[in-house]
Amino acid sequence: MPGFVTLLFRERTYTVKGQDSPFERLLSALYYSAIIFTVLGVGALAFCLDRDNVSDLWHGSYSLSSYLLLAFIGLFVLPLAIAEIGRLWQRSHKLRPWFLDKVKINSGHGVPAGWEQLFLESQAVKEERGMLLRVTLADGRVVGGFFGEDSLAGYTAHTRDLFIESRWTLDTEDQWFEAPAAGNRGLWIAAEQIDSIEVYTPAEVGVDQEVESD
């Protein structure tokens, strides 16, 4: 049970439910349960609990409040803590890359596809200054816009649609960024309509002032 609770916390904070089979989800839940029981075991050693204490706990010799507290820690506190540690680790832009580099693990090892890699790598840019996307559609048209904190790139194979919070007009010659489209409140693009995506920071295309004034 603690492992399943951890999975639920993870999927509601920083991960998107993938296409895992029921057996794979069961293995993941057992993995997190093992971590939680290990932490509880280490905690028991830290508090100098011995075999007799465990036996008394098993036979119901403690008060009801003790069992409720233990259940609360095992079913809510530790799963939430593990999920939060995982979220902070996933979003780390210094410690995680440094550690992966030291142990020779590719940073894209846990990324299922190039789509996820694109937007994971661009997350820091999105949060700091936003970014400009140039999207080529399946019918050959090119659209562009500003992708900031109010934008969204869906994850997993079934939700890879794209919401750009502010559409920009492009010049007719090079299909390059000109200015925010007047009165535009956003642009949604279905996943099947996307052929390719180019990502630029505003400074790279020389439109810092337009982005700031918008």
Image: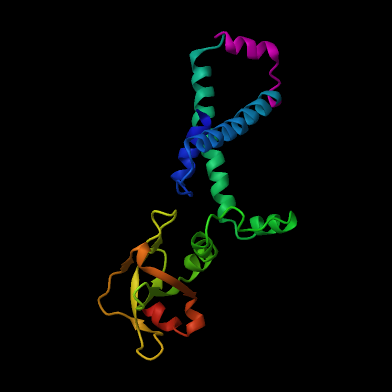
Q: Main secondary structure of the magenta part?
A: helix
**Residue 96: image location, x then y, percent:** 64, 55
Q: Is residue 123 above or below residue 156?
A: below
Nearest to the observer: residue 196 or residue 150: 196
Q: Is residue 177 above or below residue 155?
A: below
Horizontal side, residue 123 vs residue 162: left or right = right
- At 44% across and 55% down in the image, what residue appears? 155
Horizontal side, residue 190 vs residue 92: left or right = left
* Magenta span contains residue 51: yes
| Colour pattern | rainbow
Q: Quadrant of the C terminus?
A: bottom left
Nearest to the observer: residue 196 or residue 103: 196
**Residue 105: image location, x then y, percent:** 69, 55
- At 53% across and 42% down in the image, what residue appears? 83
**Residue 123: image location, x then y, percent:** 51, 63
- At 37% across and 72% down in the image, what residue appears? 138
Q: Quadrant of residue 109?
A: bottom right
Q: Seen from this angle, which residue lies furthest bottom?
A: 173
Q: Seen from this angle, which residue lies furthest front?
A: 139
Q: Is residue 132 above or below residue 82?
A: below
The region drawn magenta spans 46-60
Nearest to the observer: residue 192 or residue 174: 192
Q: Quadrant of residue 186?
A: bottom left
* Magenta span contains residue 68: no
Report how many numbered discs are placed on residues in the image.
0
**Residue 31: image location, x then y, percent:** 59, 34
Horizontal side, residue 43 vs residue 14: left or right = right
Nearest to the observer: residue 84 or residue 34: 34
